[in-house]
Amino acid sequence: MTYTETLGLSAFNWHNALDNPPRIGSQEHDNLSYKAKSWTTCACGNQCEVIPRDSKGVPTDFELASLGIRFSSQVRDGCWIDARRTLKLIEIRANYLITNEHNCNNT
């Protein structure tokens, strides 16, 4: 389950959103930018719930939090290719944290 889902929200498919990005400056772009800057709906929020977070949902892992901030800025600025690359890095870092620090995948 994602962190977003633990808050009663629907997970958001960032890959789909970035594959068909909105026109920069449009209402859709504003909505996407809002999702990207909120820790509950951003790319980090759509990762596994076991990743440690503070009370605002910010990952306590510095590298993951930094990637989330970068991702938000790239979405805001309409840098779609860079945002896709950062999303992949977020997924890699989240998987590392889940696998190596939380043993979610080790049953």
Image (tube, helix red, strand yellow):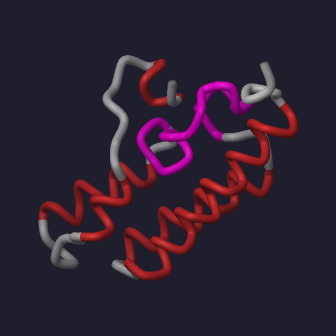
Image spot of residue 16 (x, y percent) = 29, 59
Q: Is residue 43 above or below residue 102?
A: below
In the rendered image, the residue lying farthest to the front is 107
Give the main secondary structure, helix, strand or loop, of the magenta stretch: loop
Q: Is residue 107 above or below residue 69?
A: above
Give the image quarter of residue 38.
top left
Q: Residue at x 68, y 26 (%)?
A: 50
Q: Residue at x 13, y 70 (%)?
A: 26
Query: Which sits in the foreground, 39 or 94?
Result: 94
Answer whether residue 42 is magenta in the image.
yes
In the rendered image, the residue lying farthest to the left is 27
Image spot of residue 30 (x, y percent) = 23, 61
- 19 relative position to 40: left or right: left
- 46 relative position to 52: left or right: left
Q: What quarter of the picture does the C terminus occupy?
A: top right
Q: Is residue 101 above or below residue 37?
A: above
First to last magenta residue range: 40-58
Q: Is residue 32 above or below residue 46?
A: below
Query: Which sits in the foreground, 15 or 3?
Result: 15
Q: Residue at x 79, y 38 (%)?
A: 99
- 53 relative position to 34: left or right: right
Numbered-mark total: 0
Image spot of residue 8 (x, y percent) = 37, 17
Answer whether residue 13 is magenta in the image.
no
